Image: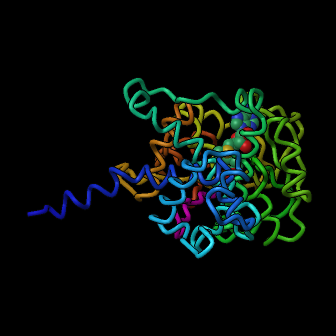
Amino acid sequence: MSDPGLADLLGPITAYQESALIGTAVETGVAEALAGGARDPEAVAAACGCDPRGVQALLSGLVAVGLAARVEEGYELTERGAPLASAHPRSVASVVRKEWFFYRVWAELPQAVRDGHARIAPWRERLAADPETSLEFLRALDDLAGLFGTELAELAGPCSGRLLDVGGGAGSHAAALVEVNPGLEATVLDLEPVGPLVAERHPDLGFVPGDLDEPRFGLPADDSWDTVLLANILHDHPADRCRALLAEAAALLRPGGALLIYDWIIDPDRAGPPPVALFTPMMLVENEGGFTWTTPEITAWLTAAGLSRTIPRGASGPISVLRATP
Ligand SMILES: C[S@@+](CC[C@H](N)C(=O)[O-])C[C@H]1O[C@@H](n2cnc3c(N)ncnc32)[C@H](O)[C@@H]1O
């Protein structure tokens, strides 16, 4: 007699196959070719420079998981599979490319669990060695914020004056805050190669090159801000670095200013919420010393930085907001 518990376990055991089909459909251009009208596997293979038998195997797999369908002339993307093409109005192609990159990084999870070290280089090295892949990653984060929204604006409370988005990437979260706080003057601080991406994605934001490893992140001594935002930054760093980063960020605030933290915050027992718990091994493989932090841990670092009033604002999704003031 079959064991329903074991049968249920087969799903996660083989889940890599669906991820690989999706990554391959985007990576090879097969999703793009299908969206562009190619139907017959031979025509799709010719359009993508692929092997016809290989394309047929991929198409069969895509049909099995509901991303493509058999039609009279060959195959087409289903409604569920259509966003895999980059021309789709709600395309997830950049997100697939980012996750396909991590698919291969996660294959090294056993080594990371054994030795505790990340499997990829820090941002500065990644941006220097392979700027296109690194900027594509940041484009994917911006697309995700655009597709799924960001609750930051509604949870942060009103912001006015000057806002600095530290390690802001494409500037998705600063842009979301500007949208609901007219007149807010927002600037992204990030490593120099990220500047053109901010101009491409959110041209109304300012950009200042800076470095998290420098005092005041490389900003002049007289520069001060009403709001300093750290969105998805703390999880990239070990505890002692988080404490130092928050001290630098607090030192940039004007009197009356506020520090905003937008991050994947884990429960004190580190067992939930489920999306944050699952995000924790991602930090292990991606960032040296990366982890998910608890509200009490972050609050203690903020208090040490002179920000003793911290208001946690939970979100319906996995990412929470902490607003800290002296
Ligand atoms: C996980 S991404 C977060 C991007 C953005 N805040 C968001 O939430 O979408 C980390 C960001 O930190 C930036 N970063 C990494 N190391 C940095 C450094 N040493 N100085 C300045 N920025 C850095 C990266 O370029 C990247 O934009």
Residue 172, picture quadrant:
bottom right
Between 219 and 97, the one lying in front of the other is: 97
Q: Is residue 295 left or right of residue 48?
A: left
Position of residue 293 measured from the top left corner of the image (x, y, whole percent): 49, 45
Number of marks in the rendered image: 0
Q: Main secondary structure of the magenta part?
A: strand
Whether residue 256 is situated above or below residue 177 in the rendered picture: above
Whether residue 155 is situated above or below residue 43 in the rendered picture: below
322 drawn magenta: yes
Residue closest to the far left? 1
Position of residue 73 measured from the top left corner of the image (x, y, whole percent): 63, 72
Which residue: 64% across, 69% down?
Answer: 82
Q: Which residues are magenta?
A: 312-326
Image quadrant holding the N terminus, namely: bottom left
Between 151 and 109, the one lying in front of the other is: 109
165 drawn magenta: no
Which residue: 82% across, 31% down?
Answer: 218
Which residue: 56% across, 60% down?
Answer: 320
Q: Is residue 162 left or right of residue 230?
A: right
Residue 129, picture quadrant:
top right
Q: Is residue 217 left or right of residue 314?
A: right
Position of residue 41 measured from the top left corner of the image (x, y, whole percent): 61, 58
Residue 127, picture quadrant:
top right
The answer to whether residue 259 is visible is no
Q: Quadrant of ligand 1?
A: top right
Residue closest to the far top? 115
Which residue: 81% across, 54% down?
Answer: 163
Whether residue 70 is situated above or below residue 249 in the rendered picture: below
Between 153 and 322, the one lying in front of the other is: 153
Q: Is residue 245 left or right of residue 4?
A: right
Position of residue 36 measured from the top left corner of the image (x, y, whole percent): 75, 65
The answer to whether residue 111 is visible is yes
